């Protein structure tokens, strides 16, 4: 496990992206065989929880290598910005033009949704844990609002010598102290707390415990090197089998640490600690999906809206054909985005920030 390179984590990232894509395309199967799409891929939304866990783990390892102070904070934020913003904004602009463009401004709610998308701001206070219109054109971006908030918290902690203690302080304020001061009973459910302010709902939502769980794994990793990779490889097998059983039987399909979160948390730590054993058995296609996972996550929504609206004009009706075409086009476009946007910027990032970690 040199240079913090984890093939297992990369494979999990690819799996998480694919699961979300299949979840959002399942309606095509339902159109032909009612309920079958839900049965096959209704669990796919849980991939978001796996993304959050991985993000907490990866960012903790990465942030530990930055120097204390303003320089470290700015370097961290610049690297994160190069990682997500170019692909995000380019795909967002394409989505804008493919889903109505200027007609958007004829509707107040659509205009507010677009502005929210550009600013990573939540706008709906009573729709936790999304705090935006998650069924709209830019709906999948709700997870990035949490990501950006997480980056801000971690970057602020880099100002201090005891960065992880200060991280704990910041998260304690947002997840424990603030809800208590507002008169709420503490909860771990992603429904969050009632508030008139969407941003306050976002920063206090218990779904953030997924990031913190991933953080804890990253912080504990140096103290767990004594654990046998062979034993953890067997544990990885058990967690995968268990997850398949739970999800296929409709168990733990919700968001949050008390639902799919704990299942994926066990899977993540097992995969990480068994890296030396399992890395040579990981299918290359999962690693490749891990490479393009961010673009795949962003682009696939176009198949239900912008690009997808034109499928009927070429004689492709809702059903298995559209399902397969949507999946294939999403993967191809995601690869193009990764190859021409993410990959070149990754090289730029390495030249500007020569920290020797290989986790994106």
Image: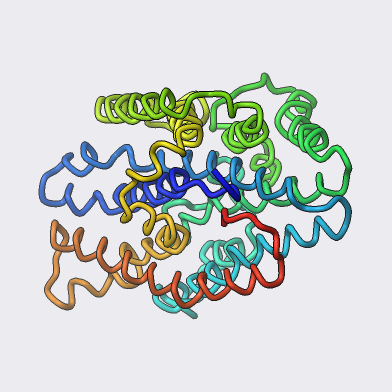
Q: Residue at x 57, y 57 (%)?
A: 360
Q: Residue at x 39, y 29 (%)?
A: 233
**Is residue 15 in view?**
yes
Q: Say above or below: 135 vs 101.
A: above
Quadrant position of residue 246: top left
- Return the x and y of residue 151 as percentages of the image width and height: 69, 51
Q: Nearer the viewer, residue 286 or 190?
A: 286
Q: Nearer the viewer, residue 181 or 248?
A: 248
Q: Residue at x 34, y 46 (%)?
A: 282
Q: How many marks?
A: 0
**Is residue 206 in view?**
no
- Return the x and y of residue 249 as percentages of the image width and height: 25, 25
Q: Residue furthest top?
A: 185
Q: Residue at x 69, y 23 (%)?
A: 184
Q: Nearer the viewer, residue 58 or 33?
A: 58
Quadrant where the N terminus sits is top right
Q: Say above or below: 320 vs 251.
A: below
The colour mode here is rainbow
Q: Say above or below: 214 vs 226.
A: below
- Return the x and y of residue 207 as percentages of the image width and height: 57, 35
- Return the x and y of residue 348 as percentages of the image width and height: 63, 74
Quadrant position of residue 173: top right
Quadrant position of residue 358: bottom right
Residue 335 in the figure: left or right of residue 244: right
């Amino acid at each position: 496990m040199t240079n913090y390179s984890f093939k297992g984590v990369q494979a999990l990232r690819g799996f998480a992206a694919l699961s979300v894509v299949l979840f959002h395309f399942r309606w095509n199967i339902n159109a032909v065989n009612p309920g079958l799409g839900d049965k096959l891929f209704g669990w796919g939304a849980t991939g978001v929880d796996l993304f959050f866990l991985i993000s907490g783990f990866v960012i903790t390892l990465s942030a530990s290598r930055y120097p204390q102070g303003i320089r470290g904070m700015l370097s961290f934020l610049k690297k994160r910005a190069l990682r997500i913003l170019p692909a995000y904004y380019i795909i967002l602009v394409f989505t804008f033009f493919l889903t109505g463009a200027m007609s958007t401004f004829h509707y107040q709610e659509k205009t507010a949704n677009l502005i929210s998308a550009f600013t990573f701001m939540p706008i709906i206070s009573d729709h936790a844990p999304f705090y935006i219109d998650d069924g709209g054109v830019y709906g999948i971006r709700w997870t990035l609002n949490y990501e950006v908030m997480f980056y801000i918290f971690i970057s602020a902690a880099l100002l201090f010598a005891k960065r992880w203690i200060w991280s704990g302080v910041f998260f304690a304020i947002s997840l424990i102290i603030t809800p208590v001061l507002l008169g709420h009973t503490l909860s771990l459910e992603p429904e969050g707390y009632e508030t008139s302010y969407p941003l306050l709902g976002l920063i206090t939502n218990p779904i953030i415990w997924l990031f913190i769980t991933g953080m804890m794994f990253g912080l504990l990793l140096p103290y767990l090197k004594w654990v046998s990779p062979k034993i953890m490889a067997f544990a990885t097998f058990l967690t995968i089998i268990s997850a398949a059983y739970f999800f296929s039987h409709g168990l733990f399909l919700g968001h949050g640490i008390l639902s799919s979160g704990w299942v994926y948390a066990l899977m993540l730590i097992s995969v990480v600690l068994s890296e030396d054993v399992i890395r040579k058995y990981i299918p290359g296609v999962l690693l490749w999906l891990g490479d393009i996972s961010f673009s795949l996550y962003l682009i696939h929504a176009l198949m239900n809206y912008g690009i997808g609206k034109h499928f009927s004009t070429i004689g492709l009706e809702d059903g298995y054909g559209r399902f397969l075409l949507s999946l294939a086009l999403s993967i191809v476009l995601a690869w193009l985005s990764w190859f021409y946007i993410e990959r070149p910027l990754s090289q730029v990032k390495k030249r500007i920030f020569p920290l020797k970690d290989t986790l994106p």
